[in-house]
Image (tube, grey):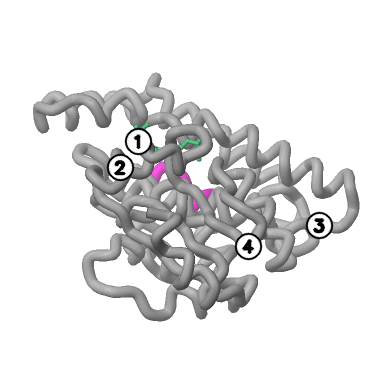
């Protein structure tokens, strides 16, 4: 599929491939947009995913991938670092940049809290399993508390204590609030009412002018309402 798109690639040099949901590609989409690059959002279905995998187009057998003028790049965090650099979202100071990397790597367990639930076919069982993730002792709860604590420790309010917004914020914002769009059975946005620090952080990032502009228009059903200012205002 990537090979067949080579003409489009000449015109639109960055080609993202992912499922038609925010998921692990959303931060990359934001970074591509903030970097003002010419890019295309290729939304694939399960059959296209299988075809790409079968054709050896996925370096690690997974999506997202980003086709670039220099070749294909996989792994959402690697792509975010690469494009984030072009968007001015990575600090130039090496230690600050490493702290941003620390945050990105540190929040990986959060990104996986639902991974054991996707293969549960029965909707009631899946719902129960996901509710358990956000029970008092669940991994979702543990990770949300940790993220809230980490963000509260920042003196600037940005996730990795950077002077300006960084890719750590893009990942944290897209990852945390994307979970509460209503796309995942059993996960209700009311869970966030227990995390006033995260709701405050939502307000800060959603109102950052580049983010607010990026999400000013989204199409119905895109699940991206969670990224708009005041998305969770009724919980405060
Ligand atoms: N570490 C990878 C994980 C990517 C990942 O889990 N991708 C999932 C979709 S969210 C996937 O491709 N699943 C299909 C499969 O594993 O067969 C990243 O961050 O990009």
Please report the residue visible at 68 percent of the width from the left and 51 percent of the height from the top: 81
Q: Is residue 109 above or below residue 51?
A: above
Ligand 1 is located in which of the four quadrants? Answer: top left
In the picture of the structure, the residue carrying the numbered disc 4 is: 69
Measured as percent of width and height from the top left, residue 214 is found at 49, 75
SS for dot 1: helix
* Whole-number angstrom distance, CA of label 2 to CA of label 3: 38 Å
Q: Are marks 2 and 3 in contact (CB under 8 Å)?
A: no
N-terminal label among 1 and 3: 1
Pointer 2 or 3: first along the chain: 2
The answer as to whether callout 4 falls within 8 Å of ligand 1 is no
Q: Is residue 3 above or below residue 73?
A: below
Q: Nearer the viewer, residue 14 or 19?
A: 14
Dot 3 falls on a residue whose secondary structure is loop
Residue ID for mark 3: 91
Quadrant in which the C terminus appears = bottom left
């Amino acid at each position: 599929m990537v090979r067949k798109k080579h003409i489009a690639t000449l015109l639109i040099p960055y080609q993202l491939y992912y499922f038609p949901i925010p998921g692990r590609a959303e931060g990359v989409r934001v970074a591509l947009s903030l970097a003002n690059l010419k890019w295309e959002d290729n939304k694939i279905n399960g059959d296209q995913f299988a075809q790409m995998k079968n054709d050896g187009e996925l370096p690690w057998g997974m999506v997202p991938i980003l086709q670039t003028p220099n070749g294909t790049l996989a792994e959402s965090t690697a792509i975010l670092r690469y494009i984030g650099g072009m968007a001015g979202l990575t600090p130039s100071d090496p230690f600050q940049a490493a702290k941003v990397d620390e945050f990105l790597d540190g929040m990986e367990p959060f990104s996986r809290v639902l991974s054991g639930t996707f293969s549960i076919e029965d909707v009631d069982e899946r719902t129960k399993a996901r509710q358990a993730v956000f029970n008092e002792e669940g991994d979702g709860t543990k990770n949300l508390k940790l993220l809230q604590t980490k963000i509260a420790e920042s003196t600037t309010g940005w996730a990795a204590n950077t002077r300006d917004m960084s890719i750590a914020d893009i990942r944290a914002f897209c990852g945390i609030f994307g979970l509460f769009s209503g796309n995942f059975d059993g996960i209700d946005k009311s869970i966030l009412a227990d995390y006033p620090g995260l709701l405050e952080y939502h307000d800060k990032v959603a109102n950052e002018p580049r983010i607010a502009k990026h999400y000013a228009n989204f199409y119905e059903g895109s699940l991206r309402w969670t990224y708009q200012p005041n998305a969770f205002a009724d919980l405060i």
